[in-house]
Amino acid sequence: MPSLTDGEIRRAFKTVEQTGKQLNLVDGEGHGTGRLVLVMKPMPTRVTADWMAQQWRDKKRTKKKLGSYPSMTLAQAREVFKRDFAGMIQKGRSIKIAGDTRPGTVADLFDAYIAHLNEGGKSSWKEAQKGLNKIADTLGRNRPARDIEPDEITALIRPIYERGKRSMADHVRSYIRSAYSWGLKSEHDYRTASERRFRLIYNPAAGIPTEPKNVGTRWLDEEEFVQLYRWLECPDRPVHPPYTRAVMVLMLTGQRVEEIAQLHIDQWDAKERIIDWSKTKNGKPHAIPVPKLAAQIIESINVDEHGWFFPSAFDRSKPVRASTLYSFMWRQRDREVIPYVTNRDLRRTWKTLGGKAGLSKEIRDRIQNHTLQDVSSKHYDRWNYMEEKRAAMEKWDKFVRQMLAKKRLKLVA
C-alpha cells in the first residue's frame, strides 16, 4: 500500500462527510513495524481525524493515539511513529507503554521537579521554581538534561561565590543537585509519570561540595527576652502591627517562622485555644495549645476576608513572608533597640528557657514538632499528648509572666 498524501486525506474528509461512515487511512506497508493509521469518524457537526499507532500482537490489534489531524501534520505523525513506536513494535513490545523517547531537556527536568514539589505540598516550591528558572536560562533550556557536566555547574556557581554571595551559591548547587537526584529516581518510579524520559547517567552536581554550615548557638537570656518583648509591645517608631505580633507569638510558642507567619483563621480553634496545622515542614500534622499570652494576641486580631492573622504590608491577600520578618528584625538590630537575634534564635530561646521553666525535653520536642527518632515514637505511639502540652504551656505562660513582672519591678525601683 503506497504512502499517504495530504491530497488523499483531504479527499477522504469529503467522502466521510458524504457517506457518514468511518474511514481508516493507512500510511505505508508497515511490515514488521506496525502501521500508522489515520482514523476518520463522522460527528454531528464535523469529521474528526486522529493519528493512531496500530500493532498486531498475540493475534490482537492494539491502537494508541499520537495526535489529531490537522494540528499534527502527516510529516509530524510519521516522525513520532518512527521515533516512539516503530522500534518497540519491531522488538515485540506493547505500544501501550510507549512514550516520548527523546531525552528530556533541562527545562523538562526542572519543570517536572517543581511539579513534584508542588504536588507534595512543599512550601519551598515557589522559591525553587524561581531559582531553577534562572539556572535553566544559563545552562540552556533546550539542551538535553543528560548533557550537563559538572564543570558547567561549577562555572555557574563560582561567580556567585566570588561576589560574596556564599549562601546563594550553595542554594544554586542545592537546587540543581535535588532536581537531578529526583530525575534519576523518577526514571524507574512506577508511581509517577513524566512526559519525557531524561535518561540520566549521573548527577552532575553530586560531587560539588556544600558550603560549611554555621550551626547557631545564640539564644536570649531572660533580660534580653524581656527587652525584645517590651519593644515589640511598644515600638519606638511606626511599624506594620502584624510584624510585631507575629514575632511575639513566635517567642511565646517556639514554632517555625513559616508556620506562624502563614497562620490562617482555619488553623485556629478559638474555643480550645489550639493552633492546628494539617501539614508541617516534616510532613506531619501538628497541633499545640498556646499559652494565654499568645492567645490574647491572636484573639485581639480582626482578620479580614482573606483570613490571615499576619498579612503582608504590601498585599493583604497574602501572609507575611518569613524573609520579611527576618529583614524587619534585622533593621531593629542595626538600630540597637533590640538584642542581636534571628528568627531561628527565637526558636532556640524557647527551647532553652522552656527547660529553665521546668518543661521536660520530651514535651518541648513535641510542642516544637521535632521528629522523634526512637522506634516507639516513630511507629507505635499515636497519642497526641494534648493534655501534657497544655499543662506545659500553662507552666511556660506563668514563667514568662514572672519574667515580665520581674523586669517591670526593677524599672520601678
Image (tube, rainbow, N blue to C red):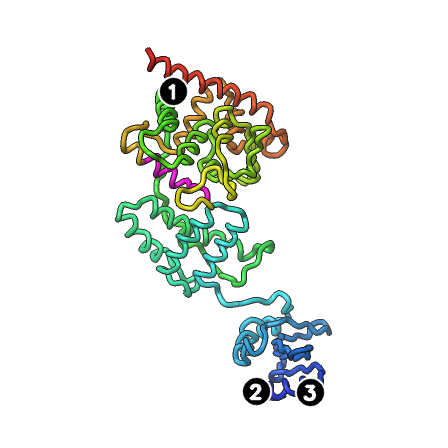
User: Is 280 a magenta residue?
Assistant: no
- Say whether marks 3 and 2 touch (CB < 8 Å): no
Disc 3 vs disc 2: which is toward the camera?
A: 3
Indicate the secondary structure of the residue bearing disc 2. Answer: loop
Residue that appears at 34% across and 44% down? 167
Q: Is residue 332 above or below residue 98?
A: above
Q: Quadrant of residue 28?
A: bottom right
Q: Which numbered disc flags the more N-terminal residue, 1 or 3?
A: 3
Q: Which numbered disc flags the more N-terminal residue, 3 or 2?
A: 2
The picture places residue 348, in percent across and down from the top left corner, at 42, 28
Instruction: Kindly report the distance in space between the C-alpha atoms of the residues bearing marks 2 and 1.
Output: 85 Å
Residue that appears at 53% across and 67% down? 101
Q: Which numbered disc flags the more N-terminal residue, 2 or 1?
A: 2
Which residue is tagged 1?
222
Amino acid type, label 3: Gln
Please state if 191 lies on the left or on the right of 129 as rendered. Answer: right
Amino acid type, label 2: Thr
Which residue is tagged 3?
18
150 vs 123, nearest the viewer: 123
Instruction: Kindly report the distance in space between the C-alpha atoms of the residues bearing marks 3 and 2.
Output: 20 Å
Dot label at residue 84:
none
Indicate the secondary structure of the residue bearing disc 3. Answer: helix
Which residue is tagged 2?
5
Disc 2 vs disc 1: which is toward the camera?
A: 1
Instruction: Kindly report the distance in space between the C-alpha atoms of the residues bearing marks 1 and 3.
Output: 90 Å
